[in-house]
Image (cartoon, grey):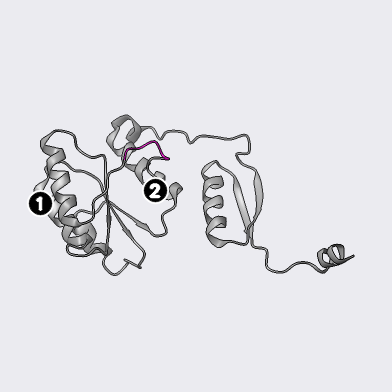
Amino acid sequence: MLNELGMKGYWVLSGAEAVRRIVEAEKRSDDFFAVILDWQMPGMDGLETLKAIRRQVDTNIPIIIISAYDYSGIEEEFIQAGADAFITKPLFQSKVLQVLNMFCAKKNKKAERIKPEEEKSILCGRRLLLVEDNEINREIASELLEMRGISVESAERRNECPCAKADRYG
């Protein structure tokens, strides 16, 4: 997904390995733009990893927590430990891009003062009816269209109308 967004992504299999790689990158002055941590991991979980990164790294690297679970009960604890953003699974490219763009704006002082205009399409401001029977596809398509300024109303195909059966069977 990060490659499709034009970013170079790296991954590790544990919290301990993540901390080690981030510390090494900082020593080389080759800091990562952001870190995406899963809340539930074997060994060091996301909270322990987050705390270790904040203790060992001087830079204020944005740390994004992802989870398939409702994290509302522990969100405050993560924020106190230094988490910058949260994304729920399944991960959608549009949501990941939205969160990463938020950090681009924060790093660019000019962008903090003047909000950049969003990319506009010729359909900006138009209404669109999206009919899709797959909920995930419907959500992804809606998000992508709304990012382009299109007002989306969605529906799912539940049952065939009687006229469709008549046409099919003569």
Q: Is residue 110 above or below residue 1?
A: above
* Depth check, front residue: 61 or 163: 163
Q: Name the residue under label 2.
A: 96
**Left or right of 146 on screen, residue 99:** left
Q: Position of residue 155 (x, y in %)?
A: 64, 60
Q: Position of residue 47 (x, y in %)?
A: 20, 61
Residue 55: numbered disc: 1
Q: How far is mark 1 from mark 2, CA to CA?
A: 26 Å
Residue shown at 60%/48% (left/top)?
A: 151
Most prominent secondary structure in the magenta stretch? loop
Q: Position of residue 11 (x, y in %)?
A: 27, 48
Q: Is residue 110 above or below residue 71?
A: above
**Left or right of 3 on screen, residue 169:** right
| Magenta span of residues | 4-8
Q: In this view, does 84 lie above or below 103?
A: below
Name the image quarter holding the C terminus: bottom right
- Locate residue 156: give its quadrant: bottom right
Circle 2 SS class: helix
**Left or right of 20 on screen, residue 116:** right
- Assess whether mark 2 and mark 1 are in contact (beta carbons under 8 angstroms): no
Instruction: Indicate yes or no whether the magenta region holds residue 5.
Output: yes
Q: What residue type is labelled 2?
A: Val
- At label 1, counting other C-alpha atoms closer than 10 Å, the crowd grade (few under 14, some 14-19, many 20 or more) is few
Instruction: Indicate yes or no whether the magenta region holds residue 113.
Output: no
Q: What residue type is labelled 1?
A: Arg
Circle 1 SS class: helix
**Left or right of 15 on screen, residue 111:** right
Furthest-top residue in this view: 110
- At label 2, counting other C-alpha atoms closer than 10 Å, the crowd grade (few under 14, some 14-19, many 20 or more) is some
Residue shown at 61%/41% (left/top)?
A: 125
